[in-house]
Image (cartoon, rainbow, N blue to C red):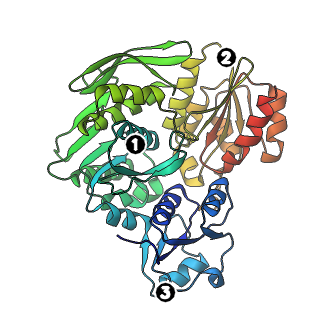
């Protein structure tokens, strides 16, 4: 797909992390970018500063004429006035996944999928390929701290790295040369209805890998389609693995065994054993792409993570503050476990905002179990996103199931004063809703302690 100078592209839902990366990609090619989103955020403000034109209320009068392409995301409600108009307008309109399909068709594509971990793995894979000076571009589902963006764009790129999203089964449009699956836990049950259907869809994604390509799985996962695969993980039977894992001076250190090499004493800036597994995933891909072992080791040691993925905001002798996108019970468990291992003698306070009524309903017991690992919990109301309320599903019901004595519901209006009164030692903000709007104010307040 060639869209550049002289072309005009319109994005319905331009503020989404995947949509904004596509907007940036076409903008770099020289196209004029317009878009709608319902909320102004720091990301949409950045897009405007980069020269894109964005408005924040639905109006067909604000849609420009002479559009060459409209891109939309399934997260936009079908009732959206602009989307209804554009679908009936005769203008070429594609889902985000269809655009990614066309962009990757003729390139060597590395597709990274999984219910958890894919954003960190995509970002780290991109960073390791950068260490190897490879001609690639990448669409990342978060803002990489090393690149300062959710897009990496190399002129005349021959390789495309994409975060393969299982939402709406959009990743089935890709035909990768390398496919990686980090996890297949139950999620998006509003789309898949049951866990078995989700697993079958991941198998279909793996089956789309080109015959000469590679399928990589985290150790412990398997495929039901008979396809051959390699594994990575902490387990000693994994093809690419870590051993001798320990914490030294507040950082995780491990030895790395690749297919054709071994490196001792790699120190990671990112905490958590789940991030060691994410590093192994990226290293496994980088080795297949002929990145040198020393370049891989250096890249792992200097990878600075992704915004809102175990993201240290304050770290001093008085207070540690970490922000994380965790919005599934397994993601919460991984994050909280990593914090407890890193700070074993500290009181850990978590602020959690559940995301979606349906997800809260489907995983109520799992959320309760994971959140009970905290020492203190501040629970916000459910962020509805695209959903209408479900009777009986609310944060009060969730709070009742959590086996902590030190727990409370809190409004957004009282959040900062509640944090101040608790004087936490290690504070976590957790969730995928608009809790991110509190990160800066919390960071500013804690930095002054």
Which x, y percent locates residue 218? 32, 34
Secondary structure under the numbered disc 1 in the rendered image: helix
Residue under pointer 2: 346
Quadrant of the frame with the N terminus: bottom left
Q: In the displayed structure, would residue 11 be above or below residue 436?
A: below
- Residue at 75%, 24% (x, y): give it: 424
Q: Nearer the viewer, mark 3 or mark 1?
A: 1
Q: What is the distance, in whole Å, between disc 3 and disc 1 at their CAs?
A: 39 Å
Does dot 2 land on a helix, a strand or a loop?
A: loop
Q: Going by the image, does 41 lie left or right of 232?
A: right
Left or right of 175: which side holds 368?
A: right
Query: Which quarter of the rendering shows the C terminus?
Result: top right
The residue to which callout 3 is attached is: 88
Q: CA distance from mark 2 to mark 3?
A: 58 Å
Name above or below for residue 256 compared with residue 216: above
Residue 86 percent coordinates (x, y): 52, 82
Q: Residues within 10 Å of mark 3 (few under 14, many from 20)?
A: few
Residue 126 bears which disc, if any? 1
Q: Is residue 30 visible?
A: yes
Q: Quadrant of residue 267?
A: top left
Along the viewing direction, whichever of 255 and 336 lies nearer the viewer: 255
Q: Residue at x 72, y 25 (%)?
A: 405
Tag 3 or tag 2, which sits nearer the N-term?
3
Q: Is residue 351 left or right of residue 243?
A: right
Q: Quick one: 8 or 421, which is closer to the camera?
A: 8
Check disc 2: other Cα within 10 Å, few if <14, some if 14-19, many if 20+.
some
- Residue 242 lies, in percent from the top left, at 34, 21
Q: Nearer the viewer, residue 222 or 117?
A: 117
Residue count near mark 1 (Cα–Cα under 10 Å), binned few <14, some 14–19, many ≥20: many
Residue 82 coordinates in the image, percent (x, y): 58, 79
Q: Can residue 74 be seen from the camera position used here? A: no
Under tag 3, what secondary structure? Answer: loop
């Amino acid at each position: 797909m060639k869209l550049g100078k002289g072309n005009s592209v319109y994005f319905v839902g331009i503020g989404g992390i995947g949509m904004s990366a596509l907007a940036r990609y076409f903008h770099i090619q020289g196209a004029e970018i317009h878009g709608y989103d319902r909320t102004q955020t720091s990301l949409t403000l950045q897009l405007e500063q980069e020269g894109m034109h964005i408005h924040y209320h639905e109006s067909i009068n604000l849609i420009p004429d002479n559009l060459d392409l409209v891109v939309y995301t399934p997260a936009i409600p079908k009732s959206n006035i602009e989307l209804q108009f554009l679908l009936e307008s005769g203008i070429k309109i594609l889902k985000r996944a269809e655009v990614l399909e066309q962009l990757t068709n003729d390139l060597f594509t590395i597709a990274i999928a999984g219910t958890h971990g894919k954003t960190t793995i995509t970002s780290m894979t991109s960073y390791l390929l950068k260490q190897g000076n490879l001609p690639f571009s990448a669409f990342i589902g978060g803002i990489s701290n090393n690149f300062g963006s959710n897009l990496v764009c190399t002129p005349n790129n021959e390789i495309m790295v994409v975060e393969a999203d299982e939402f709406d089964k959009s990743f089935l449009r890709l035909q990768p040369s390398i496919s990686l699956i980090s996890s297949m836990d139950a999620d998006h049950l509003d789309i898949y209805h049951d866990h078995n259907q989700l697993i079958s869809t991941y198998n279909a994604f793996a089956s789309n890998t080109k015959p000469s390509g590679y399928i990589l799985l985290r150790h412990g996962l398997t495929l039901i389609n008979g396809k051959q695969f390699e594994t990575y993980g902490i387990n000693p039977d994994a093809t690419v693995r870590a051993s001798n894992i320990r914490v030294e001076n507040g950082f995780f250190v491990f030895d790395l065994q690749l297919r054709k090499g071994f490196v001792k004493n790699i120190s990671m800036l990112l905490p958590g054993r789940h991030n060691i597994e994410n590093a192994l995933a990226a290293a496994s891909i980088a080795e297949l792409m002929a990145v040198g072992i020393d370049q891989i080791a250096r890249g792992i040691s200097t990878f600075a993570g992704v915004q809102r993925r175990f993201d240290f905001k304050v770290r001093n002798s008085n207070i540690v503050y970490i922000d994380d996108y965790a919005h599934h019970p397994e993601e919460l468990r991984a994050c909280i476990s990593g914090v407890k291992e890193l700070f074993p003698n500290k009181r850990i306070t978590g602020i959690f905002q559940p995301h979606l009524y349906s997800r809260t309903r489907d995983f109520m017991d799992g959320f309760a179990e994971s959140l009970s690992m905290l020492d203190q919990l501040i629970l916000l109301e459910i962020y509805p996103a695209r959903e209408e309320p479900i009777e009986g599903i609310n944060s009060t019901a969730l709070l009742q199931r959590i086996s902590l004595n030190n727990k409370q519901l809190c409004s957004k209006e009282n959040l900062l004063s509640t944090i101040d009164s608790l004087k936490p030692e290690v504070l976590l903000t957790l969730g995928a809703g608009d809790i991110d709007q509190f990160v800066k104010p919390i960071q500013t307040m804690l930095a002054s302690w």
